[in-house]
Amino acid sequence: MRRTIYKNICIIVALAVVVTTALSFFVYFHHFSGSIKKDVINESRVLAHYLDNVSAGKERTDILKKLYDNHNESRITLIDKDGKVIYDNYVKDFNNMENHNNRPEIKSAIENGTGEITRQSDTWGQKVYYYARRLSDGQVVRMSKTNDSMFEISVSVIPVMLFITFIILIISAYIANKLTRHIMEPINKVDLDNIDDNAVYDELKPFLKRIENENIERERIQNIRSEFSANVSHELKTPLTTISGYAQMITAGIAKPEDIQGFAQKIEKESERLILLINDIIKLSNLEEDNTDTYTTEKVDIDAVANHVMGVLENAALKRGIRMFYSGTPSYIYSSSVMIEEMIYNLVDNAIKYNKENGKIVVFVGSTNAGAEVSVKDSGIGIAEEEQDRIFERFYRVDKSHSKTVGGTGLGLSIVKHIAIACNAKITVKSRLGEGTTISVLFPKEISCSDRSDTNK
Ligand code: ADP
């Protein structure tokens, strides 16, 4: 970045200097050409006055010879009334020069007193400025200067200009270097850990704020991850320790033959718990990583999914004497049927696990004005108000031993929460200790649709 800023400043300065120098040169040249023309006009006026008045009676050509034969900065031509050249300090055999009466500046001088023109000279083959003046007796005196002489004088200033340009460029490069360092200094000194303490440009503050927020978010995710890994290790270790303990007792022959059956059952139960746990961990990480291979978007009828889930869980409910009621109408959303089944399964499963013996469950599915909705109501143990937010955290269980006895992993509602986030859905918990719990999920209108006609969308 430092190099880029430095390079850009240098390019801009170099361009500015070169353009300014070139323009100055042309302005100077133009101005100088103008002032040379003025000089020619003034000089010829003085000469005409001299030839007319001061030197009256003397031969004009002699006077001109004296004045101009050895001074040829400007060309002087004297033309007689009939257009014949009678003096020219640049042309030795001026007697042989062609008649000048047709020259525009001479014509104009004869008619109006003065005449001027800039044209290619036959004699010099260069651009020449001519100025002619009529004398009192009808003769015309003409003075001229080549454009080249103007150009030469202008060109003579070029080395000086180049030298000045060179000096300006060196000074600019030095200043650009200092300026770049000065601009970069606060940026280089930015302390990303204490962004508010930085004395940095206002324009950079939103950018730094974004970095700060990203850092905080990254740190938060990192903390959640490490906490999750610690929890996972702990959750995996407990059943594994139990399994290994019973297996060792059987292998070492310490277990009495009549206990072996019971030990094997415990090993089986713990292994099942492990499988459930690992499955839940996999589901959660798939959801977190937005794994599209597992979850494809399709048109899902929540009503059909809920019916299916209730069928799957019917036996588990029956075992505890729990009655399940269902009220539903076909309600469609665009989502993944795997995700929706997972969500409803976890909610109904919890309603069974945390219910009282012979309790009741009511599942509702329907389309409301706000979008499709599913709710699961139970007459179970309920959740205290202060716990209601926390139950969606990973591995959070209100009563750990109860959760374990009923085969909970502590991840079910985390999975529900992640699915709701993926669908942009809103979860509401209504619960009273000892009375029961209702958990509802409201899907947004954007992913809800009401009839079967657009199945192919
Ligand atoms: P678990 O596998 O332990 O059921 P969840 O994430 O599904 O984990 O639920 C977290 C905790 O929330 C449970 O351990 C339980 O204490 C509480 N909980 C969830 N659903 C209900 C419910 N319907 N009634 C009472 N408590 C519930």
Image (cartoon, rainbow, N blue to C red):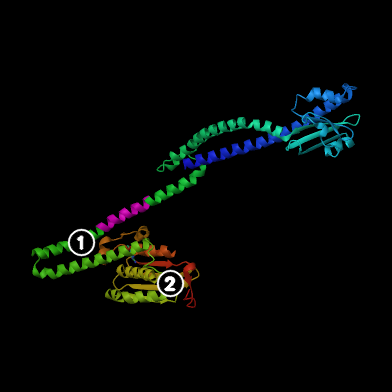
Q: Amino acid at mark 1?
A: Leu
Q: Is residue 181 above or below residue 325?
A: above
Q: Are marks 1 and 2 in contact (CB under 8 Å)?
A: no
Q: Is residue 360 left or right of residue 178?
A: left
Q: Which residue is mark 1?
A: 240
Q: Which residue is mark 2?
A: 298
Left or right of 408: which side holds 258?
left
Question: Residue at left 34%, top 54%?
Answer: 224
Q: Is residue 95 left or right of residue 154?
A: right
Whole-percent x, y for residue 124 in the image: 74, 36
Q: Which residues are magenta?
A: 219-233
For the point 51% across and 42% down, the residue is 202
Question: Is the CB of the residue bearing disc 2 within 8 angstroms of ligand 1?
Answer: no
What crowding class fits label 1: few (fewer than 14 Cα within 10 Å), some (14-19), or many (20 or more)?
A: some
Look at discs 1 and 2 and give the one toward the viewer. 2
- How packed mark 2 is, by other alpha carbons closer than 10 Å (few <14, some 14-19, many 20 or more), is some
Q: Please state which of residues 115 and 97 is positioned toward the viewer in this rendering.
A: 97
Task: Identify the residue at image location x=80%, y=31%.
Answer: 93
| Residue found at x 46% / y 40% | 187
Front one among 149 and 213: 149
